[in-house]
Image: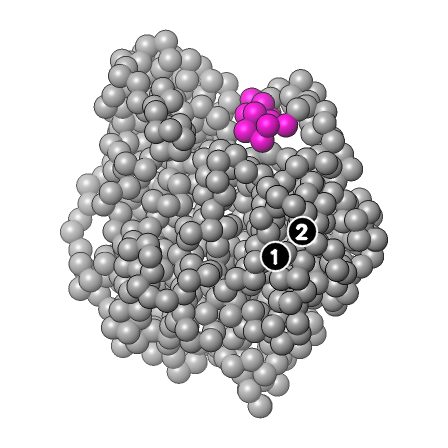
Amino acid sequence: MAAIAPIRTVTGRGVVVAGDDIDTDRIIPARFLRCVTFDDLAEGLFLDVRIDEDGRPTGHPLDRSEHAGASVLVSGRNFGCGSSREHAPQAIARAGFRAVIAGSFAEIFFANATTLGLVCLALDEGPLARLQAAIQAEPSATLTIDVAEASVTCADQRYPGRIADTARSVLLTGRYDPLAELLAGSDAIDAVAANLPYVGAAGGAR
Amino acid sequence: MPPRTLFDKVWDAHTVRTLDNGQTQLFIGTHLIHEVTSPQAFGMLEDLGLSVRMPARTFATVDHIVPTDQREEPFADALADQMIKALRANCLRHGITYFDLHSGLQGIVHMVGPEQGITQPGSTIACGDSHTSTHGAFGAIAFGIGTSQVRDVLATQTLAMSKPKLRRIEVNGTLRPGVYAKDVILHIIRTLGVNGGIGFAYEYAGEVFDALSMEERMTVCNMSIEGGARCGYVNPDQTTFDYLAGRPYAPQGAAWDEAVVRWRALASDPGCSYDDVVVIDAADIAPTVTWGINPGQAIAIDEAVPHPDRVRADERASVEEALAHMQLTPGQPIQGTKIDVAFLGSCTNARLSDFREVAAVLGGRRVAPGVHAIAVPGSTLVKEACEREGIDRVLIDAGFEWRAAGCSMCLAMNPDKLVGDQLCASSSNRNFKGRQGSASGRTVLMSPVMVAAAAVTGVISDARAVFGAGAKVSA
């Protein structure tokens, strides 16, 4: 498998999608899951809140000209709750985002995003509110996320946050896709399988 | 040896090694797949030139996209048709057991695993679906995964996982008449919050869980993820073994006796320690319904919708957003809210006991004029069992549409959808904005009997008042 590049920083403009508990149905409505590849998911990103039922734009932050080309999505607590659909971080990444900053992340979303190299930085309530205000005040400001420090800088202000150590280390070493390391454990996998009665004869590797 | 929890015992038995980042390489003994989150994973395998490592430990069915009325292929929806064909082809190519649409065994994946006896105590179970937590009812560690992780399990039968902390949720006492397993989990989520379980696995215990049937335990474990916990389990006991005995994939004969001895020993030892313990009195649990746009925004049926200015400051915006979406006025009673649709279905509440309960209370009542009521069994076996018992006739006579098995209007990936801002009394698990197929559609989560009460009265109602308290029939 090809080596993947370490992710030490993410630099780009931010866009605030306000609200707590933004669920994966909101991020990518289920009808867009009718697909056998992830290729076209970007067009469904937040679509049901970006257009009204007559198909007219609602003026969602993602569609405002001042946020065009933004690559850091900023939201509230418990971002990505709900379904396990990887379609959610896939849609975000395929729409051009390279990081999400939120109050906290739902676990499955966090794992899915990290595997894709989509950086998830959690900020406490105070810093998060100040960062959101800074982006609203100056949409053209550049954000720089420092993965090792788990912080983001915007308009000379540094906002300290959190990235789980398990995620931070794999982002920094370019091993956020775990498959190669999992494949390397082959003999140990067989040994564990052989000790599990319910796996039994079915556990033999091919 | 110090006392250990089931979680520790099962986790340790499945630990392959520690990865460089400190995560565990965890062996997944049972992998369940379906048509929505697997095709991309098979595509990735193909791109990498990898095969399925343990096809005999991989089981598939089709559930999310299947129509529940017109079941002939090709489906009218070309995208859905492409998905079922892709699943069928992938299973055939890789030698994976597939419970196909017309096999007689098809159903929601979280129904099929238990029905077939594939779901067993002490196993690890992963599936590209967050409601995989359902299988924890059997004393398994079961959790939802993304598609790249489906790829990882297909290729290696393992996952890179961080071990969660463990919270014991003890519900003691006796549930009041007219209070169901659905109310128990809605009450737990309401109490601990939709993000209260992040970083935790839940062990559900106490007198209430000891007394619950396997189907009721599945209802609770199913919604662990709605409280933020990726998995939740109940220690295995005689109820578990009685459910599994004789099922097709359960051990048979001498192997069964050995398995039961092993399973009994898996239960958490007396005196083991937990990272957190929450104790709930069963008497405090009422028939519970949601009023908002996440499953934690729930109230007892006799309570009023909250005032945004009387909640914590950091919840105000969420409450206002929810009230606006639901078209509810602060302080209004939730009872009496008009419904348009009644949905009996989903991996939370579409088992035989759910339909028996509803049939028992309906007692000749009819669905109110203007209400569209549909009943969607969770599996083909449940559908057939209901039909053998005449439950389908009771529902049809009452005015419900009786459908074939699938996820249906829980997430509306098939043709079953809300229209416009219709309000749905639903036995499903999520009331997110747009969840049931219309961006402005509104969902109120509740137990199946409460759905029946709303269906016959046309408004959100207290089933105890509509049908009389304590109609509970199933064990």
Residue A176 within the magenta-colored segment of the rendering: no
Residue B325 within the magenta-colored segment of the rendering: yes
Residue type pointed to by label 1: Phe
Verify CB contact (< 8 Å) between mark 2 and mark 1.
Answer: yes
Which residue reaches farthest top? A137
Depicted A24 relative to depicted A185: above or below: above
Residue B366 at least partly seen: yes
Residue nearer the viewer, B400 or A118: B400
Residue at 58% x, 48% y: name it.
Answer: B372
Residue A150 at least partly seen: no
Locate the C terminus of chain B and report the quarter of the image it occupies.
bottom right
Left or right? Give the position of B456 relative to A113.
right
Q: Badge 1: how crowded within 10 Å, few (<14), some, or many (20+)?
A: many
Q: Which chain is home to disc 2?
A: B
Residue nearer the viewer, B120 or A7: B120
Element on which disc 1 rests: loop
* Disc 2 target residue: B367
Element on which disc 2 rests: loop
Residue at 33% x, 16% y: name it.
Answer: A154
Coordinates of residue B251 in the picture (x, y in percent): 54, 83
* Disc 1 target residue: B400
Residue nearer the viewer, A107 or B92: B92
Residue type pointed to by label 2: Val
Q: Quadrant of residue B351?
A: bottom right
**Where are the magenta residues, as a range?**
B317-328
Residue nearer the viewer, B70 or B462: B70
Residue at 68% x, 64% y: name it.
Answer: B394
